Image (cartoon, rainbow, N blue to C red):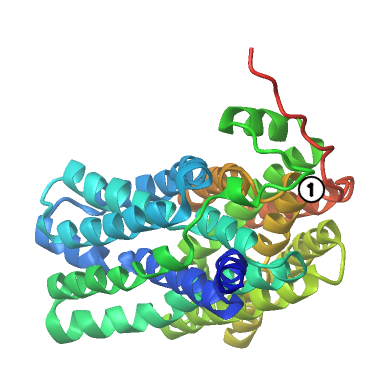
Amino acid sequence: MTDDIRARARSAGPALWLVLLAAAGTFALTMGVRQTMGLFLSPLNTATGLGLASISLAFAFGQLWWGITQPFAGAVADRIGTGRVLLAGAALVALGTFLTPFMTTTWGLVVAVGILAAGGAGMAGPAVLMGAATRLVPADKRGLATGIVNAGGSTGQFLLAPVSAALIVGIGWVAAMQVLAALVLLALPAAFVLRGNGRQAATAGHQPVSAREAVRDALGHRGFVLLAVGFFVCGFHVAFLATHLPGVVAACGLATQWAGWAVAMLGLFNIVGSVAMGWAVGRWRMKSLLALVYAVRAAAIVLFLLAPKTGPVVLVFAAVMGATFLSTVPPTAGLVAKFFGPANMAMLFGVVMLSHQVGGFLGAWLGGTVFQATGSYDAIWIADALLAVGAALIHLPIREAPVRPVPVRAAA
């Protein structure tokens, strides 16, 4: 009898609050450290003399590599276990951050910032963490759980940015990076809590298949393709805002402090939007929520273009954008899980995240290119609004239904 009780306790898995703390805490540390790297750009330039263009290349490569890493990390997590992937990811973020001050060449920075740190953040990033949360959390609580995990990344950015700035002033930028590297290691215990793999969560309606078969089935699924296209638009929008919002504020003729407050509002309301969307996922159709988010973005951009460019207007705009910033993640992750179940969730959400980061690369790059060519952000804002309208429309035909049970493929 005692053995039966112990077996049931083991099969029940860790408590819900512990799963959310581990996943959200890991995302807060990896994303928080990653998103504060911009504070070190100027000190790196002064110390190395490489020039902002060369240093920016390493940071831009990191954006793309973070996205490329996730589907592969998700496939490994689905096969051999989340815990091992998280251990490797957190260690690589810490190693890359620690080594960055010692790099004096462009390629050295590409390795430290763009490959080690960004690749580690991708391994301990949203694809693997959302997959673990989906596997360990009851189906009726998955929406809220993904919202809380997603909010963890924004919370890390919101908290670690001022901490990093204070460390740079207090102990110097090199020591500040060493402290951040040590902080990332606090995520290591989460690997034990989130251990296990997606195959253990396979249901009768979603038989476990190989990674290649899962990707092939997903790319043949109309709803999944539409979801990935919509997330491409989300990445374009998010990266453009994250990279160029201070420049937008400056182009409006406003003082620098308005840019700082706008970035803070963006991060703060991103937390609110992520948790609220996680709550809403369990109550309304996820495709309708996604269409609503993109429609709100389009309307907010148009109103901002027409409104007088005052400080309060900028803050209200940043708050609205923050509320929709990454609130697309819970319903997107929820639809992937609903289509295909948790067995290959980490890898398939990683594929969607790769689409997001390709859009992000274009949003960050085209934002600067258009401004340099025209002296204004208006053209990119108009393109962003049109993309948001398109994204709102393409989500409407998605059918929110699981795919048919996948038959067990017989060996040749």
> Considering depth in this image, is 210 or 114 the residue closer to the camera?
210
Classify the position of the C terminus by image quarter. Answer: top right
Q: Position of residue 163 (x, y in %)?
A: 31, 83
Q: Position of residue 148 (x, y in %)?
A: 60, 74
Q: Position of residue 19 (x, y in %)?
A: 54, 72
* Residue at horizontal 52 percent and vertical 60 percent from the top: 129
| Direction from residue 54 to residue 275 in the image, left or right | right
Mark 1 residue type: Gly
| Direction from residue 396 to residue 212 in the image, left or right | left
* Residue at horizontal 50 percent and vertical 77 percent from the top: 21
The residue to which callout 1 is attached is 390
Residue occupying the far front of the picture = 1
> Considering depth in this image, is 115 or 265 the residue closer to the camera?
115
| Direction from residue 362 to residue 257 in the image, left or right | left
Element class at badge 1: helix
Q: Could you say which quadrant of the image residue 5 lies in?
A: bottom right
Q: Is residue 274 visible?
A: yes
Residue occupying the far top of the picture = 412
Relative height, residue 139 to residue 210 (above, below): below
Q: Is residue 321 visible?
A: no
* Residue at horizontal 85 percent and vertical 46 percent from the top: 398
| Direction from residue 145 to residue 167 in the image, left or right | left
Classify the position of the N terminus by image quarter. Answer: bottom right
Q: Residues within 10 Å of mark 1 (few under 14, many from 20)?
A: some
> Considering depth in this image, is 350 or 312 the residue closer to the camera?
350
The number of numbered badges drawn on the structure is 1
Q: Position of residue 77 (x, y in %)?
A: 48, 47
